Structure formats: structure tokens, C-alpha cells
Image (tube, rainbow, N blue to C red):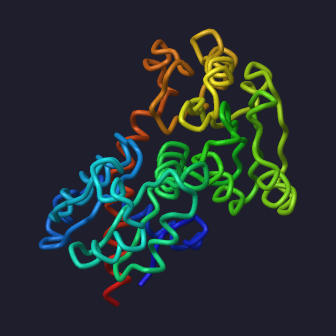
Amino acid sequence: MRHLMNPLDLTVEEISEILDLANDMEVNPKKYAHSCDGLKLATLFYEPSTRTRLSFEAAMLNLGGSVLGFSSADSSSAAKGESVSDTIRVISGYADICAMRHPKEGAPLVASMKSSIPVINAGDGGHQHPTQTLTDLLTIRSLKGRLDNLTIGLCGDLKFGRTVHSLIDSMIRYPNIKFLLISPEELRVPSYIREDVLKKHHIPFKEVVRLEEALPELDLLYMTRVQKERFFNEEDYVRMKDFYILDKSKMKLARPDMLVLHPLPRVNEISVEVDEDPRAAYFKQAQYGVYVRMALILTLLKWKNQ
């Protein structure tokens, strides 16, 4: 049995197989409509979510399965003090596979150690978000035609942004990847990403403050919101929240084939006027999230039963 805690739990070859399966699911949905008949997905979401939770639910329903779970810690026995370990032991008797989001880093890993069903990390604090990364990889590969030879700009909250950390971890495994890390000083990538991931693997990167400086070089711009829920005080959040706003005028600086991705939700960091730009791929990206989670669910259940 396999769990997914981190994108690096999957080899590059396994990721390629999952992305291939997701592409086929997009083209031939009826072929998979009964793949999970009689099976249940548990969604244990201790933190608010729209896209991740609903895309997991849509994925399982598209496969013919059913869904049970909760959408906040307040509506679960966590409010009574139940541990993650006890919850997953109980849920293992109710469902065949589980997706867990938790504000505490490492909580899904703890659950996986006590679980008798596959556990998928659907986001743990500021740490990892592997299914968003698979979604990002599917989006990039489908729209750019490759996962190598790319200059990637990561913009916004690079300190707390788990989507950014997961994407960096994954993309360094492909040839000729370069990063431009665009953030204010206070929200730079953590030192362990800079030292233990980028420098250790000799990945070219540059840290800049101005988005305008980076845009002309990019094949891909990955915008992120400044996450209010990760800040310890309101004053710092208010000071940082509108530091970057991508609008039409800035898009004129970018290459004609540059893609704009965003894990969503957005607040002010991408102006709605950019939505009509053909380079804006974030809503398509959200749709790809359903296909990639369908492929992942099916793959983990298949591995469990081999």
C-alpha cells in the first residue's frame, strides 16, 4: 500500500504515468465512469478548502465512487479533542481511501502511519501540497508540451506557500529548469529550500523583488496569494497583501507564450482584466485538478490491491 505525502514520494516515471492517465480521463471520461463503483473516499478537511475538497469529491464521483467526510475541524470530533491517529483508525473502517488537509505540518504523515487505507496529503500547513503540484505539472505539460527547459517565476508568498515548496521540489528533477523567486524580503523562500533543494542540486535561481524585472524572462509565472491564515499578526498581513498585482500593463512585458498559473483562491494579486488574456491558465488549471485527482485515486487503489 502506498500513501502520497510529498511529490517526491512518486518517481518521475510514476508521475508521467499519472499525468498520461489524467490526460486520457479528460478525453475519454466514460471509459472510467465505473472504475470505483462501490468504493468510498473520505475527505478529512481540518482547514477550509473549495477547489481541493470539491475536486477530490468530483474526482471520486466521476469514477463511480461515493464520498464521506467533514469540511472543518469544528464539525468533527477534533473539536472534542480526538487525535488524528484515532480519527484515521476509525475512518479506515468506513472508506477505501482518504484525502486529508490539516493546518499542522506532518499531520497527514502521522495519519498514514496508523492507516489501513491509502492517505493523500491534501495540504499540511505551509509544508506540502502534492496533489496541487500534480495539477500544476499536468497543466504545464498539457499547455506547454514539456516539463523541461523552462524558466519559472514564482511570485508572492514564497515563505508560507506550500504550493511553491512542492512545485520547486518536483521541477528540479527535470532538465534545464531555472527559477526566478519574486517576493518581498519578508516572504522569501525558507532557507532550507534555498540551501537544501536549490543550491544542493545546482539549480540556477535568482531572487528579485520587482515583478516587472522578471517578467520578460519567463516561460511560466506562478502567482500566489499572501495567506492571511499563515500570519501571526494583522499588521504584517495588511502591509504585504497587495505587494504584487498582475494587470494588463505588466502582462505587456511578458512573452507571447508565457503561461500564468495560480493555485487559487486569488484575492487582489491578479486583476480580473487578465482573465481574458489567452496566457491566463489558472481556471483551466483548476479543471485539470479533477483529472489528476481521478488518476491518483485510481492509481493508489490499484497499487493497494496489487
Q: Is residue 175 above or below residue 152?
A: below
Residue farthest along the top direction in this orientation: 249
Q: Is residue 197 above or below residue 288?
A: below
Q: Nearer the viewer, residue 82 or 252?
A: 82
Number of disc labels: 0
- The residue depicted at 24 percent of the width and 60 percent of the height is 60
Quarter of image, res 250: top right
Q: Position of residue 236 (x, y in %)?
A: 68, 24
Furthest toward the front, the residue is 80
Task: Please name the residue shown 73% across and 34% down the image.
Answer: 187
Image quadrant containing the C terminus: bottom left
Which residue is painted at 48% across and 79% down in the image? 113
Foreground residue among 116 and 175: 116
| x, y percent for residue 246 | 60, 18
Quarter of the image where the N terminus is located: bottom left
* Location of residue 191 in the rendering, given as x and y in whole percent from the top left corner: 82, 50
Name, please, the residue furthest toward the bottom: 306
Would residue 304 be found to the left or right of residue 131 on screen? left
Q: Is residue 12 above or below residue 52?
A: below
* Residue 192 image offset from top left, x and y in percent: 79, 55
What's the residue at 59%, 32% (across, down)?
A: 223
